């Protein structure tokens, strides 16, 4: 089922995943129009799309996801919305009102705009973090959509993404202004890596400051399964194709799907080392501090921040929940997405690792100069 002739809206189109999805849509789908919705879309990015644009119209909509009138204008005449835009924050550095406004209210306003403007398909980019891990660090290995996991979410990011996902799935089968019905689904990618990943750049920068030795923040046995950005983009495309198919539309509508690939299980820290070791980086053999000490430090810091909160807001460099996330085995299967959506990884682990390392190599001189000349 092709998206040829469709009008697609991509929120967060100027971001890490958004850019990859826009290019994939241009290369494979021959959509009538792709609308790039974001706070700002760099002109340089648009220039890179000229080689694959073909006859597809590219339209830029710059504005605020919390502006209902802007969203209605962006969705007018569209048929598919890929909602990727959100504030990603694992340090709780963003005020709750800000992250809630973008991640939850922005999603709700976008759903309402789709209903008012008769958009028939809505794909929401969720995250593995809506599952946890929980505060006890209970592991999940090769988890599925059907499993039950006891978790009270701690991060504002996790909470708001979970609520936005729930609102998206509840909106499935809502009646549109013209009498049709909206179909929705949500995708839960693992930690996404690849060209443009700012977290990898941050870890590389830390390694440069530490004389080319990467910090170990994860126990080797705390295994996760990161997913390559190109494969996540492919999953979004397959979800849109499936929602367009009358035979699949109701079967997958209102459901969520985990998105992973064949990246081997390893800890977050070991993953960083695998993609950066060809660039001359080594990694600490042991955690910077014993795990019990890290938890103790986090507990003391968080209590102090709580006491000072009425007077000053301090963002701790490390939190209990982040330490737990980095040191809990937490992996999920993509088999349901394969069965229901026809998703399969486009890129092998070898290809994904090669592309990621080559991109990091291209960024290394700039990062080294930026850090060492400070």
Image (cartoon, rainbow, N blue to C red):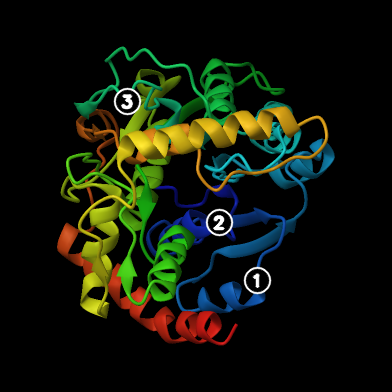
Identify which residue, 193 or 267, lies in the foreground.
267
Badge 3 vs badge 1, beta-carbon distance below 8 Å: no
Give the percent coordinates (x, y) of residue 71: 75, 41
Residue pictured at 60% horizontal, 52% vertical: 12
Q: Earlier in the sequence, mark 3 or mark 2?
A: 2
71 sits to left or right of 228:
right
Q: Is residue 188 visible?
A: no
Tag 1: Cα neighbours inside 10 Å, few (<14), some, or many (≥20)?
few
Q: Secondary structure at mark 1?
A: loop
Tag 3: Cα neighbours inside 10 Å, few (<14), some, or many (≥20)?
some
Badge 3 vs badge 2, beta-carbon distance below 8 Å: no
Give the percent coordinates (x, y) of residue 289: 34, 47
Give the percent coordinates (x, y) of residue 31: 50, 55
Q: Is residue 205 visible?
A: yes
Give the CA distance from mark 2 to mark 1.
Answer: 22 Å
Give the quarter of the image for residue 247: top left
Residue named by callout 1: 42
Residue named by callout 3: 137
Identify which residue, 43 or 245, lies in the foreground.
43
Q: Earlier in the sequence, mark 2 or mark 1?
A: 2
Residue pictured at 62% horizontal, 34% vertical: 119
Residue named by callout 2: 32
Give the percent coordinates (x, y) of residue 51: 46, 79
Q: Secondary structure at mark 3?
A: loop
Mark 3, mark 1: which one is toward the viewer? Answer: 3
53 sits to left or right of 359:
right
Residue pictured at 57% horizontal, 37% vertical: 301
Identify which residue, 301 or 223, lies in the foreground.
301
- Residue 76 vertical placement versus 141 (above, below): below
């Amino acid at each position: 089922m092709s998206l040829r002739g469709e009008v697609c809206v991509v929120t967060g189109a100027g971001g890490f995943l958004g850019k990859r999805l826009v290019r994939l849509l241009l290369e494979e789908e021959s959509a009538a129009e792709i609308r790039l919705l974001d706070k700002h879309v760099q002109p340089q990015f648009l220039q890179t799309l000229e080689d694959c644009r073909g006859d597809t119209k590219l339209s830029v909509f710059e504005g605020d996801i919390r502006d209902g009138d802007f969203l209605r204008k962006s969705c007018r005449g569209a048929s598919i919305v890929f909602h990727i835009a959100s504030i990603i924050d694992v340090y709780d550095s963003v005020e709750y009102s800000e992250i809630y406004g973008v991640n939850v209210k922005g999603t709700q306003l976008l759903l309402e705009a789709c209903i008012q403007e008769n958009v028939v398909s809505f794909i929401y980019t969720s995250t593995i973090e809506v599952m946890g891990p929980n505060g006890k660090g209970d592991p999940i290995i090769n988890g599925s959509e059907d499993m039950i996991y006891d978790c009270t979410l701690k991060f504002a990011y996790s909470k708001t993404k979970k609520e936005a996902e729930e609102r998206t799935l509840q909106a499935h089968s809502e009646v549109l202004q013209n009498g049709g019905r909206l179909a929705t689904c949500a995708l839960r990618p693992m930690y996404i890596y690849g060209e443009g990943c700012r977290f990898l750049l941050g870890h590389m920068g830390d390694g440069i400051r530490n004389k080319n030795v990467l910090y170990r923040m994860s126990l080797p046995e705390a295994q996760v399964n990161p997913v390559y950005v190109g494969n996540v983009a492919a999953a979004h495309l397959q979800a849109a194709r499936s929602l367009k198919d009358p035979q699949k539309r109701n079967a997958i509508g209102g459901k969520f799907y985990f998105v992973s690939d064949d990246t081997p299980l390893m800890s977050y820290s070991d993953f960083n080392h695998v993609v950066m070791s060809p660039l001359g980086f080594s990694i600490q053999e042991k955690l910077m501090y014993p795990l019990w000490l890290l938890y103790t430090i986090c507990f003391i810091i968080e209590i102090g921040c709580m006491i000072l909160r009425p007077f000053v807001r301090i963002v701790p460099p490390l939190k209990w929940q982040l330490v737990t996330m980095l040191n809990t085995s937490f992996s999920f299967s993509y088999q349901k997405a394969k069965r229901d959506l026809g998703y399969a990884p486009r890129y092998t682990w070898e290809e994904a690792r090669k592309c990621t390392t080559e991109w990091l190599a291209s960024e290394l001189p700039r990062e080294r100069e930026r850090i060492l000349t400070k």
